[in-house]
Each structure stands twice: as structure tokens, then as C-alpha cells.
Amino acid sequence: MDTKSNNNVTYSCKYHVVWCPKYRRKVLVDGIDERLKDILSGVANDMRSDLIKAEVMPDHVHILVSVDPQFGIHRLVKLMKRRSSRFLRQEFPRLNSRLPTLWTNSYFVATVGGAPLATIKQYIENQKSV
């Protein structure tokens, strides 16, 4: 098991997270998807988290991420959604006309404790072909 540590905690906390654009609109296309992956990776690096896998479908996002439990998955997702919404809406003005906000307030999160990491990565990769 690969573990990480900070000043007082050794951990291995991996999460599968999914969220959607407002009204589940299919707006994550035509370069927005690749830019979104870059933004999410940057946020993860800034927060000393590992973005293990990210897959962007036209109407939702899947990520597999390792997060310090003292920082919290909720704070990381909130920051990822906030920063990506701001940057994408600045860089792709067409998003402003179709949606009052880019993301819904909700998201799905599941811990990836029992399943092998390769299985979860494969599941996320296969989402494009479903």
C-alpha cells in the first residue's frame, strides 16, 4: 500500500469523485475537457494532493484522487469546482450564455479502500466508451 504522511498523520486516502455541469448540460467538449483536466491537476498539485486519474465526459467529470484527511475531500472538490468554473468561464465565454453557474452544488464521492487501484482506474478510463 502506498502511503503518504504530513507532520502527524500517515495516510492512504483515495476517493472516486463525480460531478456534473448545471442542468447536466453537455458543455464539456471542444477543448474545454482538456483544459479542465489541466486545471484540476493544478489544483491537486497546489493542495499537495495527487490527481491519479481524470476523465471528462460531455456532461460529467470523474476523478480519482488521493487527499490528506486533515485537508479533506470536501475542501479539495470545492476548490476544484470553484477554480475550474472561474477559469473555464473566462476562457470559454460560450459557457456564460448557457449556464448561470458552471457546476451543480452536489457531487458523488466514494472511498476506494477495498478495490484495487487498477480496477478503479480502468473503470474511469472505460467511462468514455459507455
Image (spheres, grey):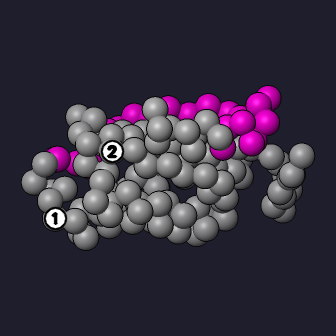
Amino acid type of disc 1?
Pro
User: In this rendering, is residue 66 above or below 119?
Assistant: below
Dot 1 or dot 2: first in sequence order is 2
Residue under the point 75% across and 41% down:
117
Task: Name the residue beneath numbered marker 1.
Answer: 93
Picture quadrant of residue 97:
bottom left
Question: Camera-side residue: 7 or 19?
Answer: 19
Report the mark closest to the observer, 1 or 2: 2
The percent coordinates of residue 41 (x first, y second) are 54, 64
Q: In the displayed structure, does residue 97 sit left or right of residue 12?
A: left
- Dot 1 falls on a residue whose secondary structure is loop
Residue under the point 46% across and 55% down:
80
Q: In the displayed structure, does residue 35 sit left or right of residue 26?
A: right
Task: Name the residue beneath numbered marker 2.
Answer: 58
Q: In the displayed structure, does residue 114 sit left or right of residue 91?
A: right
The percent coordinates of residue 129 (x first, y second) are 47, 38
The percent coordinates of residue 49 (x first, y second) are 66, 59
**What range is drawn magenta here?**
99-121
Question: Camera-side residue: 73 or 112?
Answer: 112
Residue under the point 45% across and 65% down:
39
Q: Residue furthest left?
A: 97
Question: Camera-side residue: 25 or 78?
Answer: 25
Q: Is residue 23 visible?
A: yes
Q: Residue furthest front?
A: 129
- Dot 2 falls on a residue whose secondary structure is loop
